[in-house]
Image (cartoon, rainbow, N blue to C red):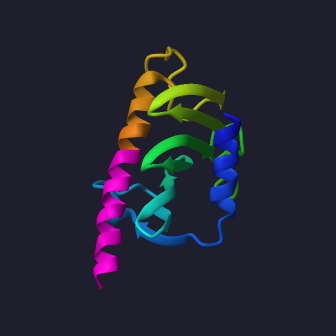
Amino acid sequence: MNNARLSVQLINLDPGLKTIKLENEDFFKIATVGGSRMTAYFKGDTIYRITIWNGLSYGVSQYEYYLKNFRPFFIYETEEGYPEKDSAGSADRTMLALNFEGKYYFDNRQLIDRKIKGRKQLENETNDDQSGSGSDQELKSLLANADSYVRILQARLKKIQAQ
């Protein structure tokens, strides 16, 4: 895990990384309420980091995928929701509060550690580890999403480099 943390720091501090930004329709089939953005950080044809921002009716979800050889070695996921501003349950849309934070460490696509804080807004209180935050099912989805994003970005990089 210390190697993963060091690799994340080195990627975040690398001034030589270029960026590509995509909007919702460029990478999602269905638009989110508040839109979505993807940003890729790359050098040459190698993608080192992908960030996803999703505007949702109840808040914002964000994902950061850190890659080595086009495979995630660390995924950081957060979800922020609009807190209730009165007893009637209406939401205060002027601020966000952190509901969930997930940190997932991988070695060759195998989970080696996870750190979970909080619960996601739409997560049912009765969920067990089969479908809740950080579950094996959710981890498979995160990895599949990473693969999809890498394919989309590689195609975009090829187009840019061909120009």
- Which residue is rendered at x = 34% and y = 78% of the image? 160
Q: Exactly how many numbered labels are in the figure?
A: 0
Residue visible at 44% across and 17% down? Answer: 130
| Residue 36 seen by the camera | no
Q: Is residue 52 above or below residue 162?
A: above
> Which range of residues does the magenta coloring cover?
146-163
Q: In the rendered view, does 17 fall on the left or right side of 33? A: right
Image side of residue 5 versus residue 162, left or right: right
Residue beneath the point at 62% across and 58% down: 11
Q: Main secondary structure of the magenta part?
A: helix
Q: In the rendered image, is residue 160 in sight?
A: yes
Estimate the x, y position of residue 56 in percent, counting from the top left. Answer: 49, 51
Q: Quadrant of the N terminus?
A: top right
* The residue positioned farthest toward the bottom in the image shown: 163
Residue 39 in the image, given as x and y percentages of width and height: 49, 64
Q: Nearer the viewer, residue 55 or 134?
A: 134
Quarter of the image where one finds residue 109: top left
Q: Is residue 70 left or right of residue 102?
A: left
* Residue 157 versus residue 78 in the image, above or below: below
Would you say residue 159 sits in the magenta stretch? Answer: yes
User: Which residue is at a point 71% across and 37% down the rendered structure image?
Assistant: 2
Quadrant (top left/top right/bottom left/bottom right) for the C terminus: bottom left
Whether residue 106 is in magenta: the answer is no
